Amino acid sequence: MSILRRMRDISVATLNEILEQAEDPIRLIDKYLGDLREQLQQSERLYQQCLAHSQSLRQQYLSAGQMAQKREQQAVLALKAGEEEMARLALHEKAQHEERGAQYKELYDQTCQSLAELEEQLQQMREDYREVADKRSYYLARLESVRLQQRMNQMRGASGEFGRRSFQRLEERVTDMEFEARTLRDVRRMGQELYRAGAGGSRAVEAELERLRRRLEQEGWKR
């Protein structure tokens, strides 16, 4: 496993631990995705710059190789023409081009290795982004389920509490009305019985009735 892969696994594991303890995981994930998106963009720009530099180095060492071949051909022609000094000069320049070509080739190989590492890093960052984006969708679905369940619980509790309170008050009121009706009925029945017994106009009854009126008036009752 490469160092980049191990770093990636550590970062994802750390994010998972943070998410489990976060009060607002969606906001945390959005921030992580935003940072990762910016890193991706920077890495992609760097990759394009390295790719252009690599192509330039390749062109440099290929051109140097072509010039070295050209100088060798010139040296051969010079020897055939008896121009040994010109042949030596051509071979000297050939050696210079070969040296320069080797230098550019070494730089090109190093750049290709860096490009490969950067490409691997980009691939891993894209995988991280997809993984975290999927995790965001999962947590968003979980939070929505919790919110819906909370609303259902609130509605269920509110409706049940309303029903119990309302029916309790209705029961008390109906009971009071029934009690008043029975009491009034009993009073009227008792009055009729007393009237038939000849006690309706007795002084004792009238005095008691007047006493009750005065008590009720003191309590705020009006005729």
Image (tube, rainbow, N blue to C red):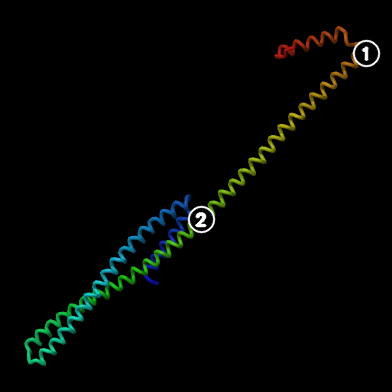
Q: Residues within 10 Å of mark 2 (few under 14, many from 20)?
A: some
Q: Residue sitting at 44 percent across and 58 percent down?
A: 15
Mark seen at residue 197: 1
> At 36% from the left edge and 58% from the top edge, which residue is drawn?
38
Which mark, residue 30? none
Q: Is residue 201 left or right of residue 223?
A: right
Task: Residue 91: name its quadrant.
Answer: bottom left
Q: Give the residue type that dot 2 points to.
A: Tyr
Which corner quadrant holds the N terminus?
A: bottom left
Q: Is residue 151 left or right of residue 82?
A: right
Q: Which residue is tagged 2?
A: 139
Residue 94 horizontal/vertical position (percent): 15, 83
Task: Residue 43: give x, y in percent of width and height.
Answer: 33, 63
Depth order, front residue of 182/131? 131
Mark 1 or 2, closer to the camera: 2
Residue 33, by quadrant, is: bottom left
Q: Is residue 71 above or below residue 215?
A: below
Tag 2 secondary structure:
helix
- Residue most extreme to the right: 197
Residue 51 is left or right of residue 143, and the answer is left
- Marks 1 and 2 sit apart, C-alpha to C-alpha, by 86 Å
Secondary structure under the numbered disc 1 in the rendered image: helix
Task: Name the residue type under label 1.
Answer: Ala
Residue 221 horizontal/vertical position (percent): 72, 14
Q: Earlier in the sequence, mark 1 or mark 2?
A: 2
Q: How many marks?
A: 2
